Amino acid sequence: MRIILDTDKKTITVPWNYAAKLEEYNNMVMAIANDPAKKKTFKTFIDDVWRECMSDTDKHLKVADKPKKPNKKDEG
């Protein structure tokens, strides 16, 4: 699932079906661990993923490709 952090606008954009995906995740947690304390909220899910990625940025940091300039042929 792709979550976008916009540091300029101070917004977090999640997929339209984020709530359903989080509910599905929590259903799996209950089916496997049967421990309500391990269920995630919007905040705890994002925080956990963020901490995991930041703990090893060599492995988890992805730099986007530089945008390509349009060809003059494509301009019109």
Image (cartoon, rainbow, N blue to C red):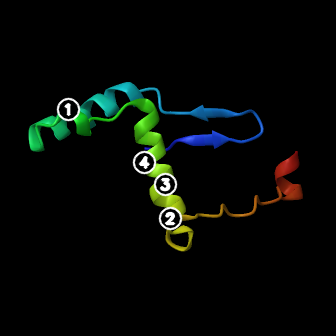
The residue carrying pointer 1 sits among few (fewer than 14), some (14 to 19) or many (20 or more) residues within 10 Å by Cα, namely: few
Q: Earlier in the sequence, mark 2 or mark 4?
A: 4
In-image side of 43 versus 13 (left or right) = left
| Tag 3 near tag 2, CB within 8 Å | yes
Outermost residue, bottom side? 58
**Residue 18, image x and y in percent?**
41, 30
In terms of secondary structure, where does tag 1 sit? Answer: helix
Q: Mark 2 is on which residue type? A: Ser
In terms of secondary structure, where does tag 2 sit? Answer: helix
Locate residue 64: give its quadrant.
bottom right
| Tag 3 near tag 4, CB within 8 Å | yes
In-image side of 57 versus 9 (left or right) = left
Q: Which residue is mark 3?
A: 51
**Residue 38, image x and y in percent?**
25, 40
Residue, x 60% and y 34% (percent of image)? 12
Q: Which mark is residue 48?
A: 4
Find the distance from the CA under tag 1 to the CA under tag 2. 26 Å
Residue, x 55% and y 74% (percent of image)? 58
| Tag 1 near tag 2, CB within 8 Å | no
Q: Which mark is residue 55?
A: 2
Find the distance from the CA under tag 3 to the CA under tag 4. 5 Å
Q: Earlier in the sequence, mark 1 or mark 2?
A: 1
Q: Mark 4 is on which residue type? A: Asp
Q: Height in image: 71 above or below 38?
A: below
Residue, x 71% and y 34% (percent of image)? 10
Q: Mark 1 is on which residue type? A: Pro
Outermost residue, front side? 37
